[in-house]
């Protein structure tokens, strides 16, 4: 079992990708959209996250209110997974609100911040200034 977790920071507008496997992934399985989880699961001790959505192996989005952990076809007028023109409705395939085995990506947002900044915990290390300017054989 493996999940790609996208952590969104609303203060800075940045998003961070974290891959979870095996034991850490089991902690996310079974959660529903709008459930909260501890940030330590994704490497953010002291933080609290909320599940906001995700997508399954086929690329179908998760939708709140669609029960279960499977993909279903539902009649929709508008909302996640379908942009309707005025008055149009269509039957669209949507994944349920529960994180299951078919889910590949889980989207989360930070609802409580810890003591250390997110960039320090999840951000990539900054490159040394001047590394890009160095060239071999300088012409």
Image (cartoon, rainbow, N blue to C red):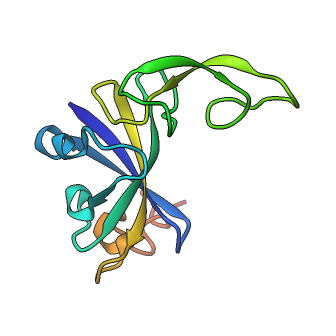
Q: Which quadrant of the rendered structure holds the C terminus?
A: bottom right
Is residue 93 depicted above or below 66 in this figure? above
> Measured from the top left, where is residue 119 in percent x and y?
38, 71
Q: Residue at x 73, y 29 (%)?
A: 77
> Measured from the top left, where is residue 130 in percent x and y?
45, 73
To which quarter of the image does residue 84 belong?
top right
Asked whether the viewer can see residue 6, the reply is yes
Q: Residue at x 35, y 47 (%)?
A: 5
Is residue 71 depicted above or below 128 in this figure? above
Q: Is residue 39 left or right of residue 133?
A: left
Q: Residue at x 20, y 63 (%)?
A: 40
Asked whether the viewer can see residue 137, the reply is no
Residue projecting furthest to the right? 86
Residue projecting furthest to the left? 23
> Measured from the top left, where is residue 80 in percent x and y?
62, 36
Q: Residue at x 40, y 23 (%)?
A: 57
Give the total of numbered labels: 0
49 or 129: nearer the viewer = 49
Q: Which quadrant of the rendered structure holds the N terminus?
A: top left
To which quarter of the image does residue 85 belong?
top right
138 or 50: nearer the viewer = 50
Q: Is residue 49 left or right of residue 46?
A: right
> Measured from the top left, where is residue 135 in percent x and y?
46, 60
Is residue 100 depicted above or below 29 in this figure? above
Is residue 13 depicted above or below 35 in this figure? below
86 or 111: nearer the viewer = 86
């Amino acid at each position: 079992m493996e999940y790609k977790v996208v952590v969104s920071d609303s203060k800075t507008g940045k998003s961070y990708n974290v891959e979870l496997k095996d034991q850490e992934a089991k902690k996310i399985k079974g959660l529903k959209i709008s459930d909260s989880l501890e940030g330590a699961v994704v490497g953010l001790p002291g933080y609290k996250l909320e599940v906001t959505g995700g997508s399954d192996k086929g690329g179908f989005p998760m939708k709140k209110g669609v029960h279960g952990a499977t993909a279903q076809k539902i009649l929709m007028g508008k909302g996640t997974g379908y942009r309707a023109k005025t008055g149009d409705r269509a039957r669209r395939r949507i994944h349920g609100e529960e994180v299951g085995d078919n889910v590949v990506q889980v989207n989360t947002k930070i609802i409580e911040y810890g003591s250390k900044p997110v960039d320090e915990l999840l951000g990539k290390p900054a490159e040394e200034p001047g590394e890009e300017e160095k060239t071999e054989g300088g012409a």
